[in-house]
Image (tube, grey):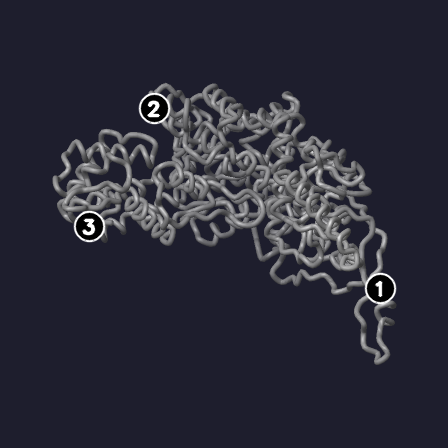
Amino acid sequence: MIFANPECRTPARGLTRLRGWFARTASVGALALILAPAAPGQAAPRGTDDFSTTIRPFLAQHCIKCHGEKKQAGKLALHQLDGSLASEKARETWARVAEKLWLGEMPPEDEQRPSPHASGRVVNWLAAEFARAGHKLTPPPAMELPGGGNRVSHEALFAAKVTPGTPPPATAARLWRISPQIYDELLRDGVGKNVKSVTQPFSMLTGEGFKDYAGAFVVDEPTTGLLMRNADSIVAAQTRFTVEDGQFKRAGFPREFNPLLDTNAPPTEAQMRTAIVQQFKLVLRREPTADELARFTAFMRKNIADAGQVAGARATLTAVLLLPEAIFRSELGAGEPDTHGRRLLAPRELAYALSFALTDAPPKGELQSALDKGQFVASRESAKREVRRMLADPKLGKPRVLRFFREFFGYHHATEVFKDDKENKEHDARVLVEDTDQLVLHILDADKDVLRELLTTTKSFVSHKNAAEQKKKRAEALAKFETDKAKNPEKFKNKTFNPQGREVFRAYGLDDFPDVQPVQLPATQRAGILTQPSWLVAFSMNFDNHPITRGKWIRERLLGGTVPDLPITVDAQLPNAPEQTLRQRLEVTKQEYCWQCHQRMNPLGLPFESFDHFGRFRSTERVQDKPATEANVDKQGKSRGPVFKEVALDTRGSVAATGDPRLEGDVSDPLALVRQLAGSERVRQVFVRHAFRYWLGRNETLADAPVLQAADRAYVENGGSFRALVISLLSSDAFLYRVNAGTVTASNPASKKVQP
């Protein structure tokens, strides 16, 4: 490759400028969430008067008791603060205050706590003051990543009325790096045909939770290098050709590139423009603007003169693959800002945002046609219409819908948990995950009381893709076994039929593959996704259950709570006591230091001891019989091995500290727990919050309360319709409008923009 961009004039400058561009755009992407818990556009008090009348009384009421003249917990003194951010020490102090308020960690839970709006006002005042002092106040990383949204008050988000003066919702203007799935689709759908030496340049968030947050990724130097190498490989495949007996023979695609490669005659201006237009269509799904076409044509002319016809042409075509638009989703907004500083997404931005919300591909069909003809208008009604159309189109693949449920429930992680085949030869995590996928799609197809059904259904798909085939093969193998046994009874005297393959139906407690799907499972054993073998395996260890991670999942995903990260000073190991049940070994977590966190998880996870770590229902737990093991020795006193016994299970648990007394209380087993959760308004609303995060690519803020309340109403009023929930979110102000990061809105229509 010669130059990375038409603006560059030498290879070195080209690479340097490209790297500089990536650094700048990565910074823009990181600004997606600047102010939290209040959204961009939140009104910010200013000046010493506001400090005296608002901030100082807040400190006096909630902070000075522990951080004042007499007591300075954590070596933090706030009683002498005067609102100035002139000194570095003052900024450090105020940053610590903001972080604690952002994370909801102060004041302590046993003290009178300020309302979320009061805390948010302090944080916004600080953000504005930092900006005026020429500095930037950013939330701690935990606030910007999945799970950070749980720190925003649930009660404030779903209050009956939105607090007066709260600005209308919007999302910070952002460049959202495309996902690996979108990049793969780009390669599959035209531009990457016949390309073999391409490496996936993008990563995603790891671990549990949602993977694609707009502000979570940067395009660093290694990623840039991969993108540049991939671009070279793609263009090399596009422009393959041979010369036989002095004659040019095309081998690549498209035909519009042929004149660039046939060195028997230099390409004309018209041929260069045609090739550039074609590459824009393939890569960006649009034609270049007049300015872009002129610049790229001049760029190609220069490259051909400097490096030769073929190398120069290829360098120019490669540059299209490195344009920001090929790497980032542009969501900046267009037109004049409204009185709150918000800009509606441009038609092309909205069309792509809607398409990427449900698929991994740019707009297609009707939407792309309307966009090309200039007939697509960015509006709430347009968004609703297109989302309804896409959701109703059976031919349109919508992988992001199922991906939401996979990432929300996390059952797909079952394939990552090692299990010893010797303990259960029937186990096949991949099939278990596929079964749950099918169950989710079945419930979504009905689209009635979706969350309740997901949490309580007693139906399941069991090895749905190959059940009939496996059943047929087993019957044939059994018939052959019986025939062989009849012919040679002496040879088969002590042999029993051992079917080949993994009979996954046993994980569900069935005696055979079902003839009809979905199958009705015993209502006394199973209820919903949390009792599916895939989910139970996903939240298990290699050789045992994991009540802690199961309880943590429920606390965070269904109850909207938080659990602090494990301190690095803690050795989180259970006692090695095989004669005890897992519940007994977990007693060690009731030490005062540990129980502060474990009380939020253990009582929610222990009811699932009704299942073993393969997800099979059980009524007893196998433990080592210590006296029998000690007595199990041979004549020389050498141990013959451990002796085990079955003990009764204790599946009791409880729901507590949820913020909703109606939801709390003791439960007898996992079925009672999930049914109690499924009937909760709070659980439903927390589910809506997670849907918001997934489709908006960021955490919710207090300013998003109207969006969340509207989405919840849409879901309820349409009989628990997940489609209605998605339509509401994808046509909301938070999805449609963008505002400059750091914008503050005064009480008058004129808004002032603060540069971060």
Of pointers 1 and 3, the one earlier in the residue sequence: 3
Q: Is residue 57 visible?
A: no
Q: Position of residue 263 (x, y in %)?
A: 14, 43
At a point 61% along the width and 32% down the height, the residue shown is 441
Which quarter of the figure has residue 160? top right
Q: Amino acid at mark 3?
A: Thr
At a point 67% along the width and 55% down the height, the residue shown is 541
Q: Which residue is mark 1?
A: 625
Q: Nearer the viewer, mark 1 or mark 3?
A: 1
Of pointers 1 and 2, the one earlier in the residue sequence: 2
Q: Which residue is mark 3?
A: 10
Of residues 13 and 120, the one nearer the viewer is 13
Q: Which residue is mark 2?
A: 372
Number of residues whose C-alpha sits closer than 10 Å to that of mark 2, classed few (under 14), some (14–19) or many (20 or more):
some
What element does badge 1 sit on?
loop
Q: Amino acid at mark 2?
A: Asp
Q: CA distance from mark 2 to mark 3?
A: 35 Å
Q: CA distance from mark 1 to mark 2?
A: 74 Å
Of pointers 2 and 3, the one earlier in the residue sequence: 3
Q: Are marks 1 and 2 in contact (CB under 8 Å)?
A: no
Q: Locate residue 649 relative to residue 234 in the image: left or right.
A: right
